Image (cartoon, coloured by chain):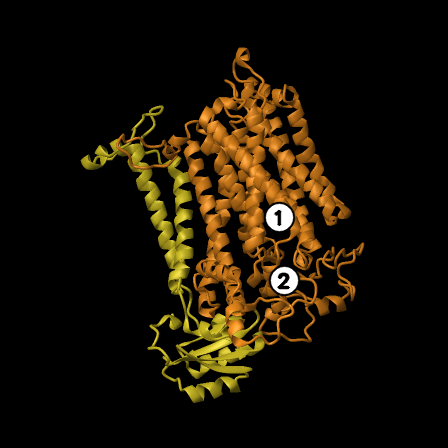
Chain colours: A yellow, B orange
Amino acid sequence: MTLNSAAPPPCETFAVMGVFADVPAVFSAAEQCRDEGFTKWDVFSPFPIHGINEAMGLKASKVAYVMGTGAILGVATAVIMQGWTAAGADIHISWLSQLSGYNVNTAGKPLFAWEQFLPVIFELGVLFSAFGALLGMLALNGLPRHHHPLMTSEHFLSCSDDGFVIAIEAADPKFDEQETSSYLKSLGATHVEVVKS
Amino acid sequence: MSAIHPDEATAIGLVRPGSVRERDPVTIDGTVTSDPTQRPPLVLGDHDFHSVTETVCGWIQQKTPRWWMAAFSVSASVAGFGTLMILYLIITGVGVWGLNNPMTWGWAIVNFVWWVGIGHAGTLISAILCLFKQKWRVSINRFAEAMTIFAVICAGTFPGIHVGRVWMAWMLFPIPNSNSIWPNFRSPLLWDVFAVGTYFTVSLLFWYMGMIPDIATLRDRCVKMMKVPVTVGPMWAPHPLPDFVKRATTFQLPMYKVGAMAYSVLALGWRFSSRHWWNYEKAYILLAGVATPLVLSVHSVVSFDFAVSIVPGWHTTIFPPYFVAGAIFSGFAMVLTLLIPARELYPGMKDFVTARTLENMCKIITVTGSMVGFAYITEFFISWYGGNPYEQGAFIQRAFGQYWWAYAAMMFCNVLSPHVFWFKWCRTTPWFIFGMSIIVNIGMWFERFVIVSSLSTDYMPSSWAYYSPTFVDIMTFVGTLGIFMTLFLLFCRFLPMLPISEVKNVLHAAHAHLHPHDDHSKGGH
């Protein structure tokens, strides 16, 4: 995750950002930045632009793995919790059966009647995977985060309303303050600004 | 897949130039069309990205409207009175309710099931309609999700206080304790704890996640406003003020400071990065994917409370689907009950919540209402066909016994009344839809009551009894309506009612490959 890299010491150039007027402009500019070979850069827009992942050359999101882990954890928790509290006596491990619950024999049915545990298994699977989705999304994005150098720019804040911004970080190997600024201008940026950290 | 730009809509004759608000008998506000080849606009008026932000944030940043203060004081008072009733119950015991021996589950379970059912619309709209790419949902999903959460809060109140000894409510959860006492995982009542708890949590996460970017928008607005100093002083003071006076009288408005802090914490540092959006969209669609079976499971599990028992009239396999259909039915009705007044009271909301949105919701009400009606008939048929005299007796008691009036009310409100929406006028006239939505909610409440009241005529006629609620029963229920409205009004006041970023996404200008001369009205894409 590019912009989450450790911030350089204060009052150094953090990035150069260019403001674009509309979606088609920022979209084609993003495609050119990608082709130019920048690595530490980002597009900021008030809503997810359809197809911007390809225009920026982003790889598939890893959220699904975090979520899948959550689902497995949830199901495992549910199986262990229910098995332990309802069928400890059926599990022939001495220290586990010490902790077992009621072990009530109902109509001669086995204590570990897994069919009856399905609703809770399903619910906990969903619960944990939902946490996986939200927390995984936040973790992959490096959020929550208290502050970001770009937020010092008044023009940057417009991307929460109707602005479209491309920022190229100073940490990028191809970065040069003068050149990158004029490059962004040549892509059609209406305003180019150097952001200090 | 895009909304038609207003100009384009005008060009193909969907919107009459000049006024979109005027009622047109054919297209109503320009969005109702029976021609499936035409895609009516999702957003009316000449909105661009900035005007969407201004409209939605304007509702929050405006001066508190008078009607809001009035509505809030009434609903908060009702909520307070309801809370007093709960306190009285806890101090005195469940004897203050009208429960009697065969009817051991009274209004508490009726209200619980009713509220959980209402809570179905939000996640249905935001998850299932999201997977089906029903873009008209964007204007109502935030609203409906908020309603879901508040309805589930009201629902959760009832089992909590119904256990009698409220201080033992922790035993609902598998908490390790020195007596090695565990809840019974074979009981549907415990499944219910997990189902409703999971539903509440997942709905809350879904709602919050959808709101993060919009809260970030509010944060940025508050931060901007916070930096604008305000100078106070008498009108006759010289202008410009001398510097030393200016320094003393200039300050930042504290409300923006408080707003900026609160929204900053909630926005989690969101900065609208496309790399973030990419993970965010993936997480959102995956969450919609797991929330979809969840929506269908919650009321199924609630119905197991009844269906897994052996009480005649309850022990049927039709309960899960029939409860879910009823839940969606009542949930959509409650969304309409809240949406139609809000649409009138908030300026500019009609541009987003169009007549077509209301029409679509009415259609869903008719579909689910018909499913519920079909289930009622199936239940009767099966009880006759099954040949079990106890089952037959239970159904005869239901329809013609001491609670015939509840059954009649249910049949009228749920089976007959939704069919008025076959008429176009009925499903496009807001005040009429509002009235219907209340009738549907009353009907659904009676449905729950009819089911629960099967208890009053149990196996032995000698123990049959008539159940009627007490004042405390009634006021607790009314109190939860107050809690619901109070929470909802707070939501309307402080949080974005429409998903700003999603609404922007359906605007025509949101598309990168924009060819101004494409004719979007033909062929579609």
Task: Find residue B281 and report its horizontal and vertical position in percent.
Answer: 48, 62
Label 1 or label 2, whichever comes before in sequence order? 2
Task: Find residue B484 and report its horizontal and vertical position in percent.
Answer: 56, 42
Q: Residue at x 72, y 40 (%)?
A: B419
Q: Residue furthest left?
A: A94
Mark 1 lies on a secondary structure that is helix
In the rendered view, would you say A177 is above or below A197? below
Q: Residue furthest top?
A: B462
| Badge 1 amino acid | Met
Q: Residue at x 40, y 61 (%)?
A: A138
Q: Residue at x 59, y 76 (%)?
A: B240
- Disc marking residue A74: none
- Disc marking residue B69: 1
Query: Chain for mark 1?
Result: B
Query: Chain for mark 2?
Result: B
In the rendered view, would you say B452 is above or below B19? above
- In the picture provided, is B509 more to the left or to the right than B199? right
Could one spot residue B324 in this view of the protein? Answer: no
The mark closer to the camera, 1 or 2, is 1
1 and 2 marks on the same chain:
yes
Quadrant occupied by the C terminus of chain A: bottom left
Task: Tell me if mark 1 has few (under 14), some (14-19) or many (20+) residues whose alpha carbon lies within 10 angstroms of its own.
Answer: few
The residues tagged by marks 1 and 2 sit, at their Cα atoms, a distance apart of 21 Å
Residue that badge 2 annotates: B55
| Badge 2 amino acid | Thr
Could one spot residue B418 in this view of the protein? Answer: yes
Which of B461 and B177 lies nearest the eye of the viewer? B177
Quadrant occupied by the N terminus of chain A: bottom left
Mark 2 lies on a secondary structure that is helix
